C-alpha cells in the first residue's frame, strides 16, 4: 500500500509538472508568436501533445509516435515558416485557403493517430513490450552478419521486379526484413550493452550505401537508432533524452548537407540523363559526395535549411484543392478511396494488365499545376489526407483516415503477439508502421496497398521461417532459463 501511495504521489507530481510546462509554453506563445498564426500554432502544439498522450514518449507504440510525428511535421511546417517570416500563413504562401489546409491536415494526423491507438487497444500501454524479453537470447554477431547478407540481397529486388513484375509488391518484404534486422540489432546492442562493434559496422555500411543511392536511404539508419532508444528500458529518462538529442542533431546535420548537395550528386549519378538510375561506380559516387561536402559553405547550409523546411511541408496541394473546390473547379469522378480498395482487391498477379499507378496525373487533375509524372521518372501525389477531403469533405474526411490508422494499429497488435516469434515480429511491425505510415504525401492507394502487402508478406515469412530465423540468430546460451529481469540485474551492476 505504501508503494502504491508513493507511485500515486509521483504520478500526481508528474502531472502537475507537465501542466506547469504547458502553461509556461502557452504564455511564451502568446507573447512571441505572430498574431496572425496564433491559433494555428496553438492547434499544432495541441495536436502534438495529443500524440504524446496517445502513445507516450517510450512505450510499445513508440514507432507510432515517430510515424505520426513525421506527419505532424509535414502538416505544420508551413505554419512555423510563416511565423519565422512574421506574416500570416496565407500571405506567406499566397494561397487563400492554406490556413484551412494546415488545420485540417493537423486534425487528420490526429485522427490517424487515434485510429492506431484504438486499433491496437485502449488498455493502458505498457512502458516496454514483453516481446523484447528475448533480446538477451540473440547474438549481435549473428544478427549483424544476417542483416548485411539481407542488405546485399536487397540489391536484387529491382532485378526481381523486372523479371516478375506481377509480384513487384510482394518483394517489398525484402526491404521490410532488411530494415527489421538492422532495427533488431540496435535493440539487441542497446538492451544488452554488447556488440557495439558489430552495430557500428552495420550502421556505417548502411549509411555509405544509402549515400551512394539515388535517394537519401541513409536516414533509416538514424531512424532505427532513435526508435531503439525510445523502445528499450536500458537507459534512464535523462540519458534517454540526452542520447535522443544527440542522434536528432546528427540526423539534422546529415539532412542539411544532403539537401545542399543532392541536386549535384543526383546529376552526377545519372550523368545528366534525368533518370533515377546510377551510371557511375560506387567509388566515384562517394568521392563526389566528399568533394561536394568539402565545397559546402555556411551560406549553403543556411539555404539548405530553408529548402529542407520547404520540402518537409506538404500542405500546398491541399490548399490549392480547397481553393478550386470553393471555385467549383474540381472534377467529380469516382471516389479515390474506392479506387484504392479496388486496386488492392485485384492484385497484379491476377490481372497483369492492371493499369500502373500515376499519382502525378491525379495531382494535375485536381490542382491544374502540371507537375512532372511517370514520363519524367517521378510520381507526385496529393497525399491521402487531401484525397480524403476530395472524397468526403471537411467533416467526413476523418472517417477513412481513422480507419486507415485503425488498420495500422490492428496489424501492429497482431504481429507483436506470441503467435509470431519475438522480438522479430515486433521489429517487423515497427518497420511497417514507420516506413509505410510516416508520410503525409503518400496517396490513399499506396498507403492502403503498401500496408496490406507488407503485412501479408511479412506474416507469410514469419509463419514459415520466423522460428528458424530466431533459432539461427540465437546464441548458444539462449536455451538456458535466463530471463530479462536477470539480465537487467547484471546490466545495472555493469553500469554502476
Image (spheres, helix red, strand yellow):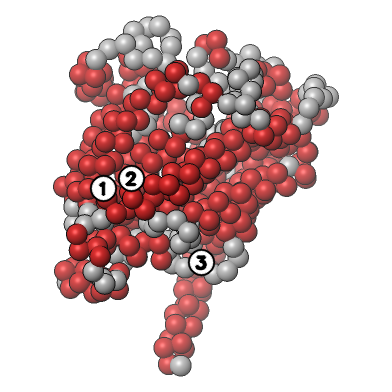
* Residues packed near mark 2 inside 10 Å, few (<14), some (14 to 19) or many (20 plus): many
Relative to 204, say whether 49 is above or below.
Answer: below
Residue positioned most to the bottom: 1
Compared across the picture, whether 22 is left or right of 472 comes to right
Q: Is residue 457 visible?
A: yes
| Residue 468 circle label | none
How far across and down, in percent of the image, does residue 226 sit? 35, 49
| Residue 125 circle label | 3
Which residue corresponds to mark 2?
181
How far across and down, in percent of the image, does residue 455 sit? 52, 44
Q: Residue at x 33, y 45 (%)?
A: 181
Mark 2 or 3 closer to N-term? 3
Q: Residue at x 49, y 29 (%)?
A: 311
* Residues packed near mark 3 inside 10 Å, few (<14), some (14 to 19) or many (20 plus): some
In depth, the one of 73 and 478 nearer the eye is: 478
Q: Are marks 2 and 1 in contact (CB under 8 Å)?
A: yes
Q: Quadrant of the C terminus?
A: bottom left
Relative to 261, say whether 435 is above or below.
Answer: below
Mark 3 or 1 closer to N-term? 3
Q: What is the distance, in whole Å, between disc 3 and disc 1 at their CAs?
A: 28 Å
Amino acid at each position: 500500500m505504501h508503494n502504491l501511495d508513493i507511485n500515486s504521489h509521483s504520478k500526481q507530481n508528474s502531472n502537475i509538472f507537465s501542466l506547469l510546462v504547458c502553461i509556461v509554453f502557452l504564455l511564451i506563445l502568446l507573447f512571441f508568436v505572430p498574431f496572425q498564426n496564433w491559433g494555428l500554432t496553438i492547434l499544432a502544439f495541441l495536436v502534438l501533445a495529443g500524440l504524446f498522450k496517445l502513445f507516450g514518449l517510450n512505450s510499445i507504440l513508440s514507432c507510432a509516435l515517430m510515424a505520426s510525428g513525421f506527419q505532424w511535421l509535414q502538416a505544420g511546417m508551413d505554419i512555423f515558416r510563416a511565423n519565422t517570416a512574421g506574416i500570416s500563413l496565407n500571405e506567406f504562401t499566397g494561397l487563400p485557403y492554406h490556413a484551412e489546409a494546415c488545420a485540417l491536415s493537423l486534425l487528420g494526423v490526429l485522427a490517424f493517430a487515434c485510429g492506431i491507438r484504438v486499433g491496437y487497444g485502449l488498455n493502458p500501454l505498457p512502458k516496454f513490450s514483453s516481446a523484447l524479453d528475448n533480446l538477451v537470447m540473440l547474438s549481435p554477431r549473428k544478427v549483424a552478419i544476417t542483416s548485411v547478407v539481407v542488405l546485399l540481397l536487397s540489391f536484387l529486388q529491382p532485378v526481381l521486379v523486372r523479371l516478375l513484375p506481377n509480384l513487384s509488391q510482394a518483394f517489398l518484404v525484402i526491404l521490410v526484413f532488411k530494415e527489421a534486422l538492422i532495427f533488431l540489432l540496435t535493440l539487441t546492442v542497446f538492451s544488452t550493452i554488447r556488440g557495439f562493434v558489430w552495430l557500428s559496422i552495420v550502421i556505417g555500411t548502411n549509411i555509405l550505401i544509402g549515400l551512394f543511392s539515388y535517394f537519401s536511404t541513409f536516414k533509416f539508419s538514424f531512424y532505427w537508432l532513435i526508435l531503439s532508444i525510445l523502445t528499450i528500458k536500458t537507459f534512464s529518462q535523462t540519458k534517454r533524452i540526452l542520447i535522443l538529442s544527440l542522434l536528432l542533431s546528427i540526423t539534422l546535420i546529415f539532412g542539411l548537407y544532403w539537401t545542399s548537395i543532392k541536386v549535384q550528386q543526383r546529376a552526377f549519378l545519372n550523368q545528366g540523363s534525368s533518370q533515377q538510375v546510377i551510371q557511375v561506380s560506387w567509388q566515384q559516387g562517394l568521392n563526389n559526395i566528399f568533394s561536394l561536402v568539402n565545397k559546402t559553405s555556411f551560406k549553403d547550409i543556411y539555404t539548405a535549411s530553408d529548402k529542407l523546411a520547404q520540402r518537409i511541408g506538404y500542405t500546398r496541394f491541399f490548399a490549392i484543392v480547397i481553393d478550386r473546390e470553393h471555385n467549383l473547379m474540381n472534377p467529380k469522378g469516382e471516389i479515390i478511396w474506392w479506387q484504392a480498395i479496388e486496386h488492392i482487391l485485384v492484385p497484379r498477379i491476377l490481372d497483369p494488365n492492371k493499369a500502373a499507378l500515376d499519382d502525378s496525373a491525379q495531382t494535375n487533375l485536381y490542382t491544374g499545376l502540371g507537375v512532372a509524372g511517370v514520363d519524367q521518372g517521378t510520381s507526385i501525389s496529393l497525399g491521402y489526407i487531401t484525397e480524403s477531403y476530395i472524397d468526403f469533405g471537411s467533416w467526413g474526411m476523418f472517417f477513412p483516415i481513422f480507419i486507415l490508422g485503425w488498420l495500422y494499429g490492428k496489424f501492429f497488435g497482431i504481429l507483436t503477439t506470441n503467435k509470431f516469434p519475438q522480438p522479430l515480429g515486433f521489429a517487423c511491425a515497427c518497420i511497417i508502421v514507420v516506413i509505410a505510415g510516416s508520410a503525409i504525401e503518400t496517396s490513399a492507394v499506396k498507403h492502403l496497398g503498401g500496408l496490406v502487402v507488407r503485412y501479408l508478406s511479412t506474416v507469410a515469412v514469419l509463419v514459415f521461417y520466423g522460428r528458424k530465423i530466431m533459432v539461427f540468430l540465437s546464441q548458444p546460451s539462449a536455451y538456458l532459463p535466463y530471463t530479462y529481469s536477470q539480465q537487467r540485474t547484471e546490466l545495472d551492476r555493469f553500469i554502476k
